Amino acid sequence: MSASGTVIPNRSVSSIRSGIEGAIEAIIFASRWLLAPLYLGMVGAIVMVGLKFFQEFVHYLPNVMGMETTILTNAVLELIDLVLTANLLLIFLFSGYENFISKINAAIHHKDRPAWMGTVDYGGLKLKVIGSIIAITSVQLLKAFVNIKAYTREELIWLAVLHLVFLASGVAFSVMERMAAHTAAHEG
């Protein structure tokens, strides 16, 4: 009973603990929104890559008719590299936001919504990222071999080794994801 004469219900220790646990979990769950500004920053990174793309395009365009084929090929590969980088950012942006923050409701009924959007889990995101990195390193390696005279033997070896490391990582991620899916299928 309180000083005013009203009866105060006796709360059990477990209900207090449950209330504290619920509050902590609500705070932890809401903390995912701390990532939202980082994803907005990634939108800015896509803008930066786009600006760099057009800067390179405008740089090469006036001289295209007098360019050697190897220089033109390198210019085109540079543009492809920038587009692949922007694609990687977009995949990471969409998948990361939907996996860790919230569903992107603005795109649910949009006719241009990518088919993979909303279906890529964290494992699938890793595979898409490593696949994009392998594509980017492939372009870098191709640029080096098109302009092979501009590189030392050691630089070419390192480019090839790094590409093979990313390729091996991609295969390892793929095998691990397949094993995890196989295990989950047997347990479920």
Image (cartoon, rainbow, N blue to C red):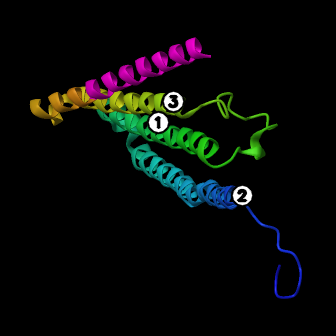
Residue visible at 52% across and 50% down? 46
- Could you tell me residue 69's position as x and y percent? 32, 29
Q: Nearer the viewer, mark 1 or mark 2?
A: 2
What type is the residue that disc 2 sits on? Answer: Ser
Is residue 55 or residue 180 the one in the foreground? 180
Q: Is residue 49 above or below residue 130?
A: below
Name the residue tied to disc 1: 84
What type is the residue that disc 3 sits on? Answer: Gly
Q: Residues within 10 Å of mark 2 (few under 14, many from 20)?
A: few
Name the residue tied to disc 2: 15
Which dot marks residue 140?
none
Q: Earlier in the sequence, mark 3 or mark 1?
A: 1
Residue visible at 56% across and 56% down? 35
State left or right for residue 104 relative to residue 32.
right
Q: Could you tell me how far apart the alpha carbons at marks 1 and 2 are, in whole angstroms? A: 53 Å
Name the residue tied to disc 3: 123
What type is the residue that disc 1 sits on? Answer: Leu
Q: Quadrant of the C terminus?
A: top right
Is residue 92 or residue 152 the one in the foreground? 92
Residue visible at 31% across and 22% down? 168
Range shown magenta: 163-188
- Magenta: main secondary structure equals helix
Q: Is residue 63 above or below residue 11?
A: above
Q: Earlier in the sequence, mark 1 or mark 2?
A: 2
Q: Is residue 180 magenta?
A: yes
